[in-house]
Image: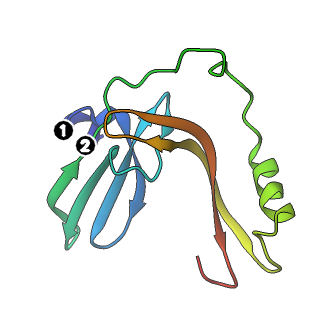
Amino acid sequence: DFIARNVYNGKEYQLSDLSSDNMAYEQTFEGYPIMNNSKARLTFNLNNGKATSYKQTAMNNIHMAEGSNSSKKQVISPRKAVEALYYNRYLKQHDQVIDARLGYYSVVKETNVQLLQPNWEIKVKHHGKD
């Protein structure tokens, strides 16, 4: 893959968004994307399908936290995540779940430290709109 061979630590990134003028990758940790985080992205600007420039940010020294609250726990299934949206009235009649992916979100964003937590990202089409 071009990114893995030609970009610094390219193997740590996975494609997250593609449009006619932009291609975005997210850094991964333990195989899961670090989602919606400006400190863990690789973005290419495109013109006629060719890269004209890129910007890369990366988190370094990512590791599991230590302490009593850092033991591994079972992540809920995507079905349970969608059910939680429904029961909490985030989903309306005729909404359509179009994608679900597991990754990490930052729950604490400090200058030098970020706390990542596993989360489901659920994409929903509301009455025909993403």
- Category of crowding for the residue at label 2, using alpha-carbon neighbours closer than 10 angstroms: few (below 14), some (14–19), many (at least 20): few
Q: Name the mark on residue 2.
A: 2
C-alpha gap between disc 1 and disc 2: 6 Å
- Is 80 rendered above or below residue 13? below
The residue drawn where x is 80% and y is 50% is 79
The residue drawn where x is 61% and y is 49% is 101
Residue type at tag 1? Asn
Which residue is farthest bottom? 127
Pick the quarter of the image with the N terminus: top left
**Residue nearer the viewer, 99 or 63:** 63
* Residue 112 shown left or right of residue 77 in the figure: left
Which residue is farthest right? 87
The residue drawn where x is 20% and y is 34% is 8
- Is 19 rendered above or below residue 128? above
* Residue 8 shown left or right of residue 116 in the figure: left
Which residue is farthest front? 110
Pick the quarter of the image with the C terminus: bottom right
Callout 1 touching callout 2 (CB < 8 Å)? yes
The residue drawn where x is 77% and y is 42% is 77
> What x and y, as percent, mark residue 92?
79, 77
- Category of crowding for the residue at label 1, using alpha-carbon neighbours closer than 10 angstroms: few (below 14), some (14–19), many (at least 20): few
- Is 95 rendered above or below residue 81? below
Which residue is farthest left? 52
> What x and y, as percent, mark residue 63?
45, 21
* Residue 14 shown left or right of residue 73 in the figure: left
**Which residue is the site of mark 1?**
6
> What x and y, as percent, mark residue 34?
46, 42
Label 2: state its secondary structure.
helix
> What x and y, as percent, mark residue 65?
52, 20
Label 1: state its secondary structure.
helix
Residue type at tag 2? Phe
